[in-house]
Structure formats: structure tokens, C-alpha cells
Image: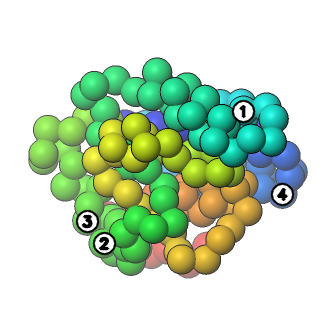
Amino acid sequence: MHIRIVAVGKVRERYIADALADFRTRLRPYHRVDEVELHAADGADPTRAIRLEGEAILKLLDPADHVWLLERSGELLTSEELSRRIERLPHQGIARLTVVIAGTYGASATLLARADFRWSLSPLTFLHEWARALVVEQLYRAAKIARDEPYHH
């Protein structure tokens, strides 16, 4: 499976960048992984930021992409459910999963409409950078679960 992560905003904290790099490396034996980082919209107007970031994300999406949008109000999954859901995708004719992490203010209505699945990590609010690290870690955990490999580190 080809997994592409599209995220708005730069990872600034070194420890989070290190965690992301570690989990990307761990994930690569299981899936082809690409990451696209978009600049957050300048300015303090949330409505404008949502629109501009949504437009930028939508330009990156191919019509054939299967899009999961990280969304606090989305569906909560256990790690096992996440693993099963990802493992089913190739059997449904899906070659690439694109996981989208919108900007700080959330996703535009057109991006919400484009999403094939809205995934929530938790009803809690996380720092944007942490959410990104959690997504990659959970994708790695799901790959380990799918292959009945232990995951304890």
C-alpha cells in the first residue's frame, strides 16, 4: 500500500521531528510512505486560512486518491480497527491512501466533502505537531498488528 500524508504546517519541535523520522523509518518496510508538508496560511483570519489551506490540499489530491481526513469529530478507531481498515483497502481496489492533516483552524467544507473517511485520534485537542506524530505512529502500529508482529516499542 502506498500511504501519503499531506499536512499543513511545519514541525518545529526537534523531539517531534525525531519521533516522526523514527516512525517513518519503521513504517517503510511495510508501506511506501510519502509526506507532503504545506505552508500554513499567513494571517490571523481563520476563515481565510481554512479556505486557502483547503484549496492547496485539494490541488494535491488525485481523483483516484482514497482520502482520510484527520478530524476531531470523525470516527474513533482502535488500533486493531485501524489495521483492519487499512488492510482492506487494496482488496477494494485502492492503491494509495492519502491521510490529510488540515491546518490549525480545521478543514474547509470542500475538503470535508472530499474525504472518504473522517478519522479522529481522540476527542481531546492535541498540538498540531503531536497529532502528526501520532498518525505516523498509529500507521506503524497498524502495520505491525496486520502481520501479527509484537508492538511494544
Identify the residue position indicated by label 1 in the image: 41
Image mark for residue 15? 4
Q: How far apart are marks 3 and 4 (CA)?
A: 30 Å
Kind of residue at badge 3: Arg
Identify the residue position indicated by label 2 in the image: 81
Q: Distance between the residues labelled 2 and 1?
A: 34 Å
Q: Residue at x 33, y 43 (%)?
A: 113
Q: In front: mark 3 or mark 1?
A: 1
Kind of residue at badge 4: Tyr
Identify the residue position indicated by label 3 in the image: 84
- Mark 2 lies on a secondary structure that is helix
Counting residues from the N terminus, which is met first, the one under dot 2 or under dot 4?
A: 4
Residue 58 at x, y = what percent? 45, 28
Q: Are marks 2 and 3 in contact (CB under 8 Å)?
A: yes
Q: Distance between the residues labelled 1 and 4?
A: 24 Å
Task: For label 3, count other residues whose C-alpha is less than 10 Å away and answer few (under 14), some (14-19) or many (20+).
Answer: some
- Mark 4 lies on a secondary structure that is helix
Kind of residue at badge 1: Ala
